[in-house]
Amino acid sequence: MTFETTLAEEIWDKKYKFKSDSATDGSLEKTFDRVATAIAKAETPSLRKVWVKKFKSALTGFQFIPAGRILAGAGTARKVTLFNCFVMGTVPDDLPGIFEHLREAAITMQQGGGVGMDFSTIRPNGAAVLGVGANASGPLSFMDTWDAMCRTIMSAGQRRGAMMGCLRIDHPNIESFIEAKRDGARFRNFNLSVLVPDAFMAALKTNSDWDLVHNDTVYKTVSAQSLWDKLMQATYDAAEPGVIFVDRVNALNNLAYCETISASNPCGEQMLPPYGACLLGSLNLATLVKTPFEKTACLDEDKLEDLTATAVRFLDNVIDVSRFPLEAQEKEAKSKRRIGLGVTGLADALIFCGIAYGSDEAVKTTEQWMGAIKRAAYRASAGLAKEKGRFSLFETEILERHNLLSLDEETRSLITSHGLRNGCLTSIAPTGTTSLFANNVSSGVEPVFAFSYNRKIKQADGSFHTEAVEDYALSLWKRLKGDAVMPEDVFVSAQTLTPEHHLKMQAAAQRFIDSSISKTVNCPEDISFEDFQGIYSRGFDMGCKGLTTYRPNSITGSILSTTDESTKDKDLKKLTPYLPPRAEKLTGSTYKLKWPPSEHAVYVTINDTEEVDGMRPFEIFVNSKNMEHYPWTLALTRMISAVFRRGGDVSFVAEELKAVFDPQGGAFLDGKYVPSLPAAIGGIVFKHLGLDVDITADPVITEAVNTAKKVGLCPKCSQYALLRKEGCDTCLECGHSKCG
């Protein structure tokens, strides 16, 4: 079993290959062995060998791709969850409850789960807090505490946590929520979505007024159209917030008889009740097409049905073998046994069949394929119910829910006889990294963004090399067809598609999906606001449960950009990360900083670039003859320069530096105590920005440091308890001793 691309092997090595002192996945085959064996432990002992073989067969060739948490964590004995994301409990409108939910979110992210929250329950800014004679600070201020917490949590020790913050469109603070992402420094760890009920969409159609209300108190009345325009303008300018049509989500939910949904996971493909969890895996449609690029090309639906049944059983088993950060999450997961089986490689599979993404034929074919998956998934779940038992909250009322009413009579008959093992079965995740891992097939139900691009790969020594990466469909074309001319009307990419193409494909898939779909409607940078603002209304009319758009803009930049490769292959683009190019000559200022603990001065240079609204910082350099500072100053300046180059309000950089406290002690500058050299550099950034901000340390910290400096910092236990006695440094805490 080998990789077809260097990038796929690198992702496996860095993200999914298990490495420990006692065991290591020596190959991709060993990784699949580990995962299949771990998941089969949910089976009875007599069946485990059978299902290890069956699960491994599904994983081989990337036919079925479990989510990254499963690939990385299954069978490792690590204290992590195999569930990707959670929606947290309903946030109460009181201080102890709010911070208890903050704690729960931190625990969940620490074990590897992303989290989603609905903050609509928190009273608005300025509302009275009875009993303490104060006014409330509002949901956005508490979201700031979640954001700060997330910055400190390295999710499962590998990557930072992800969060979704939701607010209802009738909340009194909705206008501030809509505008929040215009500040490039705020809510950087959040995706934001506005919860939009059917009543608002009706008010929008009739150009009616709309009340902003909390706990039956109307705080303000606005025009529904003006509020919608404000939301659309923010999304046009900053790509957020997205929109969730929350009443439709609940109306179409299989489990509406026993739960209410008010938030989604961070990427939006799983709308979940309080403490709900999403368990994800994808069927790789690109691997199931017979005779690709030929007139006889078609999806092998028999193989698809068998693979779907295996994937349903696999994900159902994960519920029983996974850890859960919180008891409430485990109870929720095991009482409803919700899974999220989706697809990836849809766009590539369509290309193999000679069908252009977004065309009427693509819509028809997508409906056919998704219908086959839905039917096979429900049959498999009914079979599991017969074998292992129904999910505990199963009620026959589920048979009257939308997704089950549209099933064929044979499948409905099976469910009537045996029930269902799983309350919800399907959703479509973004699959970004796992699609790259699977030799760069197209992601989820997205179109191919570009067929070839360059990717910078970091090496062990810190250097980079550039590697050309091709979409799986293009690579296969070259292997099978050589230099034959590609049909340009089939090899379409996101660069040539309209928003309407995206909406048609999302709506087509949504009709067969229990939960939701993580998909981005990519828009050209030059799309007019008038054309843009109609996308969300059209998506609602077409039956979508939620929408997210992306347009390259001055706030977020272009996440990916393209450059023509040649005239002949004008649709095949190279992608490069967005950072504005550096002009040949920049002007700036150099500041001399005499840091008392250091023998040599530190010189800080900040260069500016000119924009329409004036000068702004573009890059920073920190130089000193003291080589002790070299590694961290180099790292610091590279990171800060990257932030400067992206633009927006960069004053938060100085704020973050100001907060750095050196346990070895700071120094007095101009008669004021500054807690660290980075804090002093932050002061220079403040000064360069023309901001008069005091970077003096907090008096309490200053006193603590001055007291602590009377003794040394122990290198073993890191306590300020190191005293010099009889020529030896001796720690009063741990007993460490070293003689000079």
Image (spheres, rainbow, N blue to C red):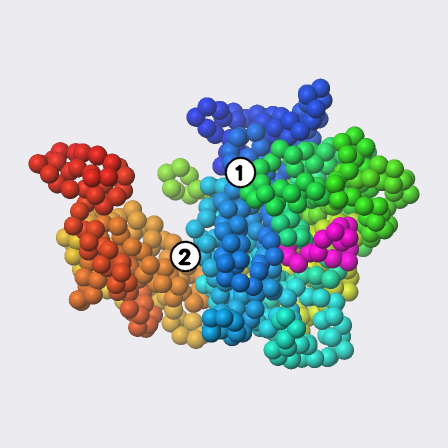
Give the position of the N terminus as an image quadrant.
top right
Magenta region, residue range = 250-269
Q: Residue at x 28, y 65 (%)?
A: 695
Residue 642 badge? 2
Which x, y percent locates residue 398?
Answer: 82, 48
Furthest-right residue in this view: 409
Disc 2 element: helix
Q: Main secondary structure of the magenta part?
A: loop
Compared to 652, does 116 lie above or below? above
Lateral position of residue 437 relative to residue 307, left or right: left
Q: Residue at x 62, y 71 (%)?
A: 214
Q: Amino acid at mark 2?
A: Ala
Depth check: 94 or 652 in front? 94
Depth check: 436 or 4 in front? 436
Q: Is residue 256 magenta?
A: yes
Which x, y percent locates residue 558?
Answer: 53, 59
Which x, y percent locates residue 175?
Answer: 58, 73
Q: How far apart, in angstroms, are the residues tagged by discs 1 and 2? A: 32 Å
Q: Is residue 480 magenta?
A: no
Query: Which residue in the structure is indicated by mark 1?
Result: 80
Compared to 335, does 225 lie above or below? below
